[in-house]
Amino acid sequence: MTVQPLIHARGLVKRFGDFTAVAGIDLDVAPGEAFGFLGPNGAGKSSTMRMIGCVSTPTEGTLSILGMDPVRDGVKIRARLGVCPQLDNLDPDLTVAENLTTYARYFGLPRAEGRRRAAELLEFVQLSDRAESKVDPLSGGMKRRLTIARAMVNQPDLVLLDEPTTGLDPQARHLLWERLFRLKQQGVTLVLTTHYMDEAEQLCDRLVVMDAGRIVAEGSPRSLIETHSTREVVELRYGDTPLESLRGKLDGVGERIDVLPDRILLYADDGDAAVAEVHRRDLAPSSVLVRRSSLEDVFLNLTGRTLVD
Amino acid sequence: MATAMVATLERELVLYRRLWKASALSSFLLPLLFVLSIGVGVGRYVDANGGLGGVDYLSYIAPGVLVTTAFQIAVGESTYPVLGGFKWVRSYHAMRAAPVAPRDMVGGHLLFLAFRALLATIAFLIVVGFFGAIHSWLTVLTLPIAALLAVASAAPVTAFAATIENDNYFAILFRFGLIPATLFSGVFFDVNQLPLWIRPLAWVSPLWHAVVLSRSAMLGQAPHPGASAGWNAVFIAGHVAYLGVWAVVGVLLAVWRFTKRLQD
Amino acid sequence: MVTTFVATAGLRTGTLSPGRIGAVISRNIGPLRSGPAYWVVLVSGFFEPLFYLLSIGLGVGALVKNITLVDGSVLSYAQFVAPAMLATSAMNGAMAETTFNFFFKFKYIKTYDAMLATPVQPFEIAMGELIWAMIRGSLYTAVFLGIMVAMKLAAFGWAVAAFPATVLVGFAFGAVGMAFSTLMRGWQDFDLLTTAQFALFLFSGTFAPIENYPPAIQVIIECTPLYHAVGLVRDLATGVPDWATVGHAAYLVVMVVVGLWFTGRRLEAMLLK
C-alpha cells in the first residue's frame, strides 16, 4: 500500500509578470520525511515554499497539500502547517512567551492549552529563562529558535522552514540543527530550503537540487553525491599561476576537472592517487587538500556554477 | 472563523496592556486641557456674545471634541500600526501563515479600535461631566456613536494603509484628511458659518455626522432644531446610515486590500 | 552671541567646517529628488497653519468677535490668533524635524553613524540638521505671513519685521528639540513630548489672553517657552513691540544657546564612545 504524500505537485509553475520563478516542478513528500530544496538564491525555492504554505497561488500545475487544494482549502491546510519564514516576523512588542500564546490563539487553541504548549516549546528550544523577555534583545539564533517554537505551537503535520540557519553564526546553527534533528526523530515531517550543503546533508533524508526554477536532480544526499560526483575531490592551489593554463596539463588526472577562479578541483575516487599523478607530472601545487565529495560538488557538476557566489 | 478574529483582537489587547497607563493619562489629560483652554478660555468670550445654539460654548464643543477624540484614535491607529504590520513587524504575514483570514485581521483591528474609542469616550465624559457639559441622559448614546465613528473612519484608512508602500502618504492623509476634518466638521462652530461652497466637504466627512449625533445626544436636543420631529427622526437615521455606509464600504475595501497584499 | 558660541564649540571639537555642515544639509535635499510623495508632504506643510487660521481665526473668530488686550488695544480674533498659529507652527515644524526625524535617523537608519565615519563631526551634524529645519520652516513662515498680509491681519512692514522673529522661534525650539532627542529612550518618550507640545499650544496665550487664568497659572505659563514665542511674534505682527518683546526674544536666545551647547556635549559623548 502506498502512503498518501503530504505534498504532491505536478508541473507546478509560478510566474510574476514576465518573470518565471518556478518553471514546472514535480514533487512528492511522504509523511515523516525530512525533505530539502537546495539551490542558490533565486533558484525558486522560496516561491515553491510559499505555494506549499498556501500564501501564494500557483500559476499553473497541480498542487495538493495534506490531500487538499491550497487555493480552496488554504485556511484548513494552514491550520495543520507550521511555518518558519525566512524573514523573522516575531512580534517585537510582545514577550517571548506571549509570542507563542498569541500565535496559539490564531489556531483556536484554548488559552490554558496555549500557555501549556508555550512552556513546553520554550523548554524544547531552550528559551525558558527568556520567557518574559522582549523579542528585540534576543540574538539571531534565539529569535530563529523562537520562530521554530512558534511554528510548532499547533502540533503541525508538516513544518516548513525557509532558510532556517541563514545569517546565524556556526554555534547557533549547530544548536538549531540539533533541535531540528530531534523534531525529525519525533516523526515530524520537515520541508526546508537551504543554500548550505552541510545543512542539507545534516538534515535531509531526500532533497531536490533547484536551479533557475527547475529541479535538476533529486535523491538522498549520498545518492546524489554518488551519481553526480566522485568519492573524493582534490583541491589544488597554485598561488599566482594562471590556472586555465594548467587545465590541459592535468588532462586525464581523475574523472573530471573544474577550474575555479582561485583553485582547481579534481574529481577522483582515489584522491591520493590523483595527487601522486599531479606530482608525477611535475605540477606540484602550492597547497593541496583531499576531501570527501559534497553536495557543493554535485551542484557545480550539475550547473557549472558554485552555490555560494 | 470568529475565533481567529477574537485572537487578533486579543493580540491588540495584550499589546495595549503595556501602554494603557500612558494612554489613560492622555485620555483624561488631553480633554481636560482642551476643555480648560478652549471651553473655558475661549468660551468666556463666546458666552459674553450670547453663546452658541442656546448653550454655553463648553457644552457646545464638548460633544464634538468627544467624537473627534475617537476619530483621531481610530485614524491614527490605522496608519503606522497597519503599514508596520505589513512592512516592518510583518505581523500580518505571521497571522497569514496561521489560519487567520484577512477578514479576521481587519475585524480584530476594528473591534480593538471600537474598544479604544469607548474607553476614550468614558474618560472624556467623566471629565466634561465635572464641567457641566452633560445635559441629557441620552449622553449614554455617545458610546455607540463613538464606536460606530471609530469603525467608519478606521476601516477606509486601514484599507489605505494596506495599499501604500511609503509612509509619507500618511502625512498627506493627516494634513488633508484628519486635520481639516477636525477643524471644519462643526466641532468648534456651526458648519453653516462656512461659505456655502465649502459646506459639502464638511457634509462628506463622517466626523460631521457623528458630531451632529453626539451633540444632539449630550444636549438632549433635536439634531436639526428647525425641522419637525418626523424629519429629525429621518435625519438621525440618515446620519447613522451614512456612518454605516462608510463602515461597510471601508471594511470591504480593507479586506480586499489585505487579501491583495498578502497573496502573490 | 550665537556665533561666538558656535565658534567656541567649534574650537572644542576641532574646527567647524561650513562645507561639512553644508554636506549634512544637502543629504536632506537628496530625498527631495526621490519622488512626488516627499514633495507633496513638503508642500502640504503650508496648509496646516492655514487650515487652523481659517477654522479658529475665522470660524471661532465669528463667535468671539474681538479681544481686548491688557493695554486696552482691541484686536479681531483672527488678528489675535494668527500670530500664535504662526509661532506654534514654527515650533511644531522645528520640533518635528529635530526630535522625530533626528531620533529616527539616529537610532534606526544609522545615518549619523555613516556620517561620523567621515571627517564630519557630531556638532556639524547637529548644526546641519538644525539649519535644514530652519530653511524648511522659514519657507512655511514666509508664505503664512504673506497670507496674513493678504487677509489684512498684519501690515506688510510688521509682517516683514515678524519674519526674523519666527526664525528665532524655530531655532530656539529646534535647538531644544535636538537636546531632548539626545535624551530619548524610545518612542514612548515622544508621546510625552507630543502631549507637552499640545499643552503648550493650548495655554500659551494662543487662543485667549493668559489674563483669563488665575494668577498662579499665569506665572507658570510665563515660564514656558511657547508663551514667549507667541508674545514675540504677536507683538511684532500686530505692530506693538515694547520692552516685554525684548524679554521674549532674550528668552528664545537663551534656548538656542543652551540647546546647542547641551546637544553638542551629548552627541560627542554618545557617538564617539
Image (tube, coloured by chain):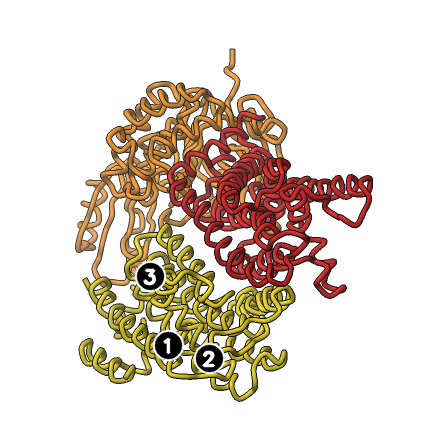
Chain colours: A orange, B red, C yellow
Q: Residue at x 70, y 62 (%)?
A: B193
Q: Marks 1/3: CA distance? A: 32 Å
Q: Residues at badges 1 and 3 in contact (C-beta under 8 Å)?
A: no
In the structure shown, which secondary structural element does the residue marked by tag 3 occupy?
A: helix
Q: Position of residue A301 (x, y in %)?
A: 39, 44
Q: Residue at x 32, y 65 (%)?
A: C112
Q: Residues at badges 2 and 1 in contact (C-beta under 8 Å)?
A: yes
Q: Tell me, yes or no, whether dots 1 and 3 are on the same chain.
A: yes
Name which residue type carries label 2: Asp
Q: Which residue is mark 1?
A: C248
In the structure shown, which secondary structural element does the residue marked by tag 1 occupy?
A: helix
Q: Tell me, yes or no, whether dots 2 and 1 are on the same chain.
A: yes
Question: Outermost residue, bottom direction?
Answer: C157
Q: Which residue is mark 2?
A: C235
Dot 1 surroundings within 10 Å: few (below 14), some, or many (20 or more)? Answer: many
In the structure shown, which secondary structural element does the residue marked by tag 2 occupy?
A: helix
Q: Quadrant of residue A144?
A: top left
Name which residue type carries label 3: Phe
Mark 2 chain: C
Q: Is residue B264 above or below residue C238?
A: above
Q: Marks 3/2: CA distance? A: 37 Å
Q: Is residue C213 left or right of residue C216?
A: right
Q: Give the quarter of the figure containing the N terminus of chain C.
A: bottom left
Dot 3 surroundings within 10 Å: few (below 14), some, or many (20 or more)? Answer: some
Q: Marks 2/1: CA distance? A: 10 Å
Mark with earlier residue (2, 1): 2
Q: Give the quarter of the figure containing the C terminus of chain C.
A: bottom left
